Amino acid sequence: MVRNSFDKELEHLHGLMVKMSALVEESIENSVIAFKKQDVSLAKQVFESDDTIDDMESKIEKICINLIARQQPLAKDLRAISTALKIITDMERIADHAADIAELTIRMADLKQVKPLIDIPLMADLAKKMVTKSIDSYVKHDIALAKEVCNSDDAVDNLFSKIVLELINIMKNNPETVEQATDYMFIVKYLERIGDHATNIAEWVVFNVTGSHDHLARKNE
Amino acid sequence: MVRNSFDKELEHLHGLMVKMSALVEESIENSVIAFKKQDVSLAKQVFESDDTIDDMESKIEKICINLIARQQPLAKDLRAISTALKIITDMERIADHAADIAELTIRMADLKQVKPLIDIPLMADLAKKMVTKSIDSYVKHDIALAKEVCNSDDAVDNLFSKIVLELINIMKNNPETVEQATDYMFIVKYLERIGDHATNIAEWVVFNVTGSHDHLARKNE
């Protein structure tokens, strides 16, 4: 009976996490569409979503803590809930970075873009897929999928390095672009961080399933 | 009796958090000294500390979760422990950023510095003090001190804007510095983030004491 009610509460928790993740994915996507199309109203929408996501994080967190306190779960269940607590922190940070991109988008809305935006949306798309898969892997206890996420991080990092080099060349050859290209630099940095957070989530999933927390895709950290 | 043992465990927890915080503060300081003096071995030391800090985070986290599960604490105590869980996440991120600075320091170790390093160490010092005070305010339940931390964030943000503008001018006037100045830009961004994380910690402290979580110093987030 208690077991049953615990499982139900866990299911409810997972449902909320999937909802939160859908909002986070939408924010990543919208932040980069707004950046590409210089769409200030869409960028503002990303800002508003960030508040909703923050509220969801608080709500899920409360549910987790109360679940631990009321049900006194043992090893495996305790791990599942502490994993959920870690995952929502990473998701909230991802949404913050989407809002950071939106902020820079609003600031640059009237300026001519310094380069064609092809790689940046590609990078955002990869990062977004990593987030989707990482949450999927949590809900389905799918280690293979979690490892796939960790492996994808290299592609995001490579795009990051490629775009940074390109921006450095643009700045060297056209010093008048420096101010704006610096903002582009921060935007790709935020996208790279989003990939890192998705990797964190995937690592928590491996911890949840196996009980040991390897830094699968981290090099020097 | 139970109350007594709970208080003892909480005291033990606070002791560990203060130790973790001391390591984090040292990392911030060392990362910027290493950057200023182009000291590769000190930068490597910051890297190694990051592993120790990660381990401390895991250890404290386990203690928190087990404390909730075993003791079934009620409102106030539950809040204290969930606050601790949030705080250590922010502390771990701060240490990550110190390691990020160390990484760039190693990369630029053989290059002539693009500007005199006065404001950046000043910014690091402010950020470090914010971290110290934020942990102090948690242990002492000191809301006034927590609010002081939130107010200090403006000084860090102002230094950030000032240094970024300066770097933009350096890049415009000396395009050959662009590559390196971009790394400086990321370094000051990491310091600005450290200030944000200290502000987060201070906000958690206010939540812990008052039970309500206002974003005291956040503007648009």
Image (cartoon, coloured by chain):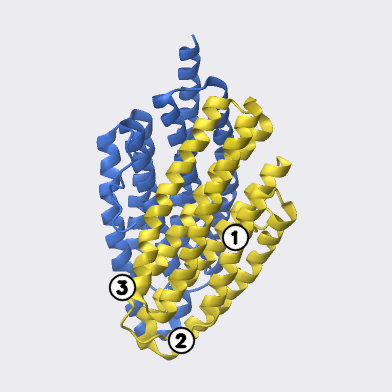
Chain colours: A blue, B yellow
Q: Are marks 3 and 2 in contact (CB under 8 Å)?
A: no
Residue A55 visible in the snapshot: no
- x and y percent of residue B194 in the render? 53, 62
Q: Is residue B132 above or below residue B122?
A: above
Q: Nearer the viewer, residue B204 or A49?
A: B204
Dot 2 or dot 1, earlier in sequence: 2
For the residues carrying marks 1 and 3, which lies nearer the camera in this image?
1
- x and y percent of residue B17 in the render? 54, 49
User: For the point 37% across and 74% down, which residue is it?
Assistant: B105
For the residues carrying marks 3 and 2, which lies nearer the camera in this image?
2
User: For the point 34% across and 29% down, which residue is it?
Assistant: A140
- x and y percent of residue B84 in the render? 57, 43
Pointer 1 local density, CA inside 10 Å: few below 14, some 14–19, many at least 20: some
User: For the point 46% across and 13% down, which residue is it?
Assistant: A4
- Identify the element where label 1 is drawn: helix
Kindly indicate whether the residues beneath marks 2 and 1 are on one polypeptide chain: yes
- Which picture quadrant has residue A182? bottom left
Residue that numbered label 2 is attached to: B115
Q: Is residue B94 above or below residue B14?
A: below
Label 2 marks a residue whose chain is: B
- x and y percent of residue A166 in the render? 31, 73
Pointer 3 local density, CA inside 10 Å: few below 14, some 14–19, many at least 20: some
Compared across the picture, whether B217 is left or right of B72 comes to right
Residue B8 visible in the snapshot: yes
- The tag on residue B132 is 1
Q: Is residue A38 above or below residue A112?
A: above
Which amino acid type corresponds to the residue marked 1 in the rendered image?
A: Thr
For the image, the number of numbered tags is: 3
